[in-house]
Image (cartoon, helix red, strand yellow):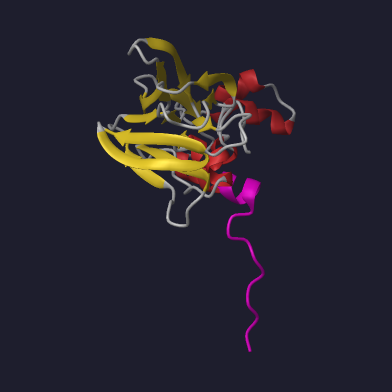
Amino acid sequence: RGGRGGEGMAGMAGPAEAEEDGRSADRAPSNLAEGGRINLTMRMRLDCRIYGKDGGMHSRYSVLNEATVDRGSSAYLANLECFCDNVHLTTVQADGLIFATPTGSTAYSMSAGGSVVHPSVPAILVTPICPHVLSFRSMVFPDHVVLRCYVPDDARADASVAFDGKHRTTLARGECLEVMMSAHPVPTVNRIDHSADWLDGLKRNFNFNARPMQKPF
């Protein structure tokens, strides 16, 4: 799982990479600047809230990569009801479900078969983890939607939710996880520009589409 607790691996475009050549990361901005300018990418985060059966908000987290609802230590499949802007989306029977940002699309979501999304695309990814059906595929939603995931009262077991791989919490029957775009993105420094850095990360970290060229007849 790339970038656990940080950015997805292809999203590593911050000043810390200046340490690759042995220099201190705190000098990166002056090294990156050309003509007094530094290119930034504003990376979207998700605002995640847990609501109890009483409708009250129990906890709230901001994530850069993903929020993951899974079966936790239970031997049973996670049973989840999902909604998009209060419209029923689907009933999930799977090991879990990932709500990811474009930055997180190269982390856990990619490992689960989700699409790889450019960090400047305003979108929220919903990727199932080992669904017990052949027709459930990763989906991409616009960033203005509000996604909700409930554990129904008749589910065989409670679910578990984690935020960027941390703060693991039980999502009990009747409780809800609400996911939406955060109003507070994270600025990251680019070496060149957001597309060049991102594509370089895909090729360097994942050997994106690398194979020997066919030889002529």
On the rendered image, what quadrant is the C terminus found in?
A: bottom right
Residue drawn at the location 44% of the way across and 51% of the way down = 137
Quadrant in the rendering for residue 107: top right
**The residue stretch that appears in magenta:** 200-217
Measuring from the top left, give residue 34's x and y in whole percent.
49, 31
86 vs 4, nearest the viewer: 86
Above or below, comparing residue 111 to residue 69 in the picture: below
On the rendered image, what quadrant is the N terminus found in?
A: top right
Can residue 208 be seen at all in this image of the molecule?
A: yes
Magenta part, dominant SS: loop
Residue 209 lies in the magenta-colored region: yes
Can residue 66 be seen at all in this image of the molecule?
A: no
Above or below, comparing residue 47 to residue 130 in the picture: above
Measuring from the top left, give residue 102's x and y in whole percent.
44, 38
26 vs 128, nearest the viewer: 128
Looking at this view, name the residue that lies furthest to the right.
22
Residue drawn at the location 67% of the way across and 69% of the way down = 212
Judge from the rendering whether residue 88 lies leftward or rightward of residue 71; answer left or right: left
Q: How many marks?
A: 0
Residue drawn at the location 43% of the way across and 41% of the way down = 92
Measuring from the top left, give residue 206's x and y in whole percent.
63, 50
Residue 144 lies in the magenta-colored region: no
71 vs 63, nearest the viewer: 71
Quadrant in the rendering for residue 47: top left
Looking at this view, name the residue that lies furthest to the bottom.
217
Measuring from the top left, give residue 181's x and y in whole percent.
35, 27
